[in-house]
Image (cartoon, rainbow, N blue to C red):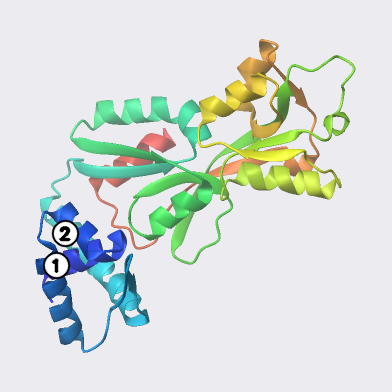
């Protein structure tokens, strides 16, 4: 089992079919099938369940994928270590919640890029759950998520406490409490978002029944929909403050348990702290 076979096996597993893996790697499908059959023979165990729509990993296949990804990650890390000369260079993959990325990351990334122009920065936004999964799978080097995060493989560092706001579109002056606006549609991000979790817990705790729940993948679309009066949402005050001041949104006092969330930086305990990575942490501390 050589490195090329490992990469081929990883691609097949992630694509879920021999044909999709062949297309991605520009191989013939027959070549991929033969290579995977040879791999199964050498492992002396079936690695795939084959069906009409593609393949699914067996228990042994899942185990082999786990070790394959560790080995490939270690190979990449070894290459980086050999190139280390005290200059920050190479890729640095950062994850973040979209709300945090919209407000705080532009200045952070601009300052970092100015000081470390040889680093290839990439930014992926998603829910806290999505970002943590990507960290654990070595797809991201570090991420900004809501905390606390309790995972034996991760290190977390506190970064910022965000004040939250429960907002709707501009309401009549007679409406003074969010409890007066029951039977409203909740505007939320997909599951895995801590803001959504807190809003649903708040509504459930108060025994209120929302009219409907609408999911958004876009922060800008959600903000526009709130201003248009579509429903209510729970978001960082840093995001909605200007809309409140401009009279486009109305905010309501929240119970203390739901009024703030901590943003933390997370990364793997076994992550190799190269120059690019340590320079980013230094940039954050400043």
Q: Residues within 10 Å of mark 2 (few under 14, many from 20)?
A: many
In the foreground, 225 or 2: 225
Q: Residues within 10 Å of mark 1 (few under 14, many from 20)?
A: many
Q: Horizontal placement of 38 versus 152: left or right?
A: left
In x, y percent, where is residue 29? 14, 63
In the foreground, 109 or 56: 56
Q: Which residue is mark 1?
A: 32
Image quadrant containing the N terminus: bottom left
**In this orientation, does residue 81 appear?**
no
For the residues labelled 2 and 1, say whether their Cβ atoms are less than 8 Å apart.
yes
Sequence-wise, which precedes: disc 2 or disc 1? 2
Q: Residue most toward the top?
A: 246
Residue placed at 17% from the left, 40% from the top? 87
In x, y percent, where is residue 162? 62, 35
Residue placed at 34% from the left, 50% from the top? 141
In the foreground, 154 or 178: 178
In the foreground, 29 or 223: 29
Q: Which residue is mark 2?
A: 22
Residue placed at 50% from the left, 32% from the top? 218
Q: Residue most toward the front?
A: 52
Q: Horizontal placement of 235 versus 83: left or right?
A: right
**In this orientation, does residue 218 appear?**
yes
Q: Secondary structure at mark 2?
A: helix
Image quadrant containing the C terminus: top left
In x, y percent, where is residue 160? 56, 38
């Amino acid at each position: 089992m050589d490195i090329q076979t490992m990469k081929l096996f990883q691609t097949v597993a992630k694509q879920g079919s021999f044909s999709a893996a062949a297309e991605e790697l520009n191989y013939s499908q027959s070549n991929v099938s033969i290579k995977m059959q040879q791999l199964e023979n050498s492992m002396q165990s079936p690695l795939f369940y084959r069906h009409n729509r593609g393949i699914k990993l067996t228990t042994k296949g899942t185990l082999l994928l786990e070790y394959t990804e560790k080995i490939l990650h270690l190979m990449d890390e070894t290459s980086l270590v050999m190139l280390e000369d005290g200059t920050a260079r190479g890729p640095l993959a950062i994850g973040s919640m979209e709300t945090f990325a919209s407000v705080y990351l532009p200045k952070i990334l601009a300052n970092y890029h100015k000081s470390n122009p040889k680093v290839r920065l990439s930014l992926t936004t998603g829910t806290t759950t999505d970002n943590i999964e990507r960290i654990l799978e070595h797809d991201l080097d570090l991420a900004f998520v809501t905390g606390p995060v309790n995972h034996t493989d991760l290190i977390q560092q506190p970064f910022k406490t965000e004040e939250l706001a429960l907002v709707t579109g501009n309401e009549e002056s007679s409406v003074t409490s969010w409890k007066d606006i029951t039977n409203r549609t909740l505007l939320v991000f997909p599951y895995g978002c801590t803001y959504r979790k807190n809003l649903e817990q708040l509504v459930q705790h108060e025994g209120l029944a929302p009219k409907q729940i609408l999911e958004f993948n876009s922060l800008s679309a959600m903000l526009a929909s709130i201003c248009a009066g579509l429903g209510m949402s729970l978001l960082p005050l840093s995001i909605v403050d200007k809309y409140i001041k401009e009279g486009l949104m109305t905010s309501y006092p929240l119970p203390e348990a739901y009024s703030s969330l901590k943003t933390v930086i997370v990364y793997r305990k076994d992550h190799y702290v190269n120059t690019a990575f340590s320079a980013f942490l230094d940039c954050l501390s400043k």
